[in-house]
Amino acid sequence: MSDAPAPVDDAQEPTNEHQAAEAAIESVKALHCEWKRYETDPSPGYCAHCEKDGDLIPWPCPTMIALGQAERAAGGSSG
């Protein structure tokens, strides 16, 4: 009899921990969505949550960039 762990089935259902992590990521994305000062604003937009020294941060903000990089590294899609 072997003491080796059972093989992991990649097709298994996501765990509660996985689902909680996904929900947290979606909450962060909702906070850091693109915002424009007015509907016809030609600028690329700003992060609805971030600011630095009172100035708006262009969108995508560092948080969204980091999430996108993490998703690409994990094999997901960003955005």
Image: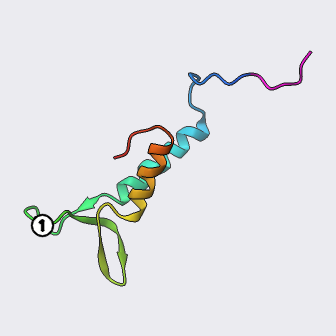
- What residue is at 80 percent from the left and 26 percent from the top? 5
Image side of residue 70 versus residue 7, left or right? left
Magenta-colored span: 1-6
Q: Position of residue 60 (x, y in %)?
A: 32, 60
Instruction: Measuring from the top left, give residue 37's x and y in whole percent.
Output: 16, 69
Question: Which color scheme is applied?
Answer: rainbow
Single out the residue that lies furthest toward the right: 1
Q: Report which quarter residue 51 is drawn in.
A: bottom left
Say whether residue 23 is left or right of residue 35.
right
Near-viewer residue (53 or 16): 53
Among the 4 quarters of the image, the one containing residue 34: bottom left
Q: Residue at x 89, y 24 (%)?
A: 3
Up/down of 46 relative to 14, above or below: below
Identify the residue under disc 1: 38
Quadrant (top left, top right, bottom left, bottom right) of the N terminus: top right
Q: Amino acid at mark 1?
A: Tyr
Q: Is residue 8 above or below residue 60?
A: above
Residue 61 horizontal side relative to residue 38, left or right: right
Residue name at image x 49 percent, y 44 percent? 73
In-front residue for pair 20/73: 73
Tag 1: Cα neighbours inside 10 Å, few (<14), some, or many (≥20)? Answer: few
Nearest the eye: 25 or 43: 43
User: Which residue is found at the position 43% from the left and 56% from the top?
Assistant: 28
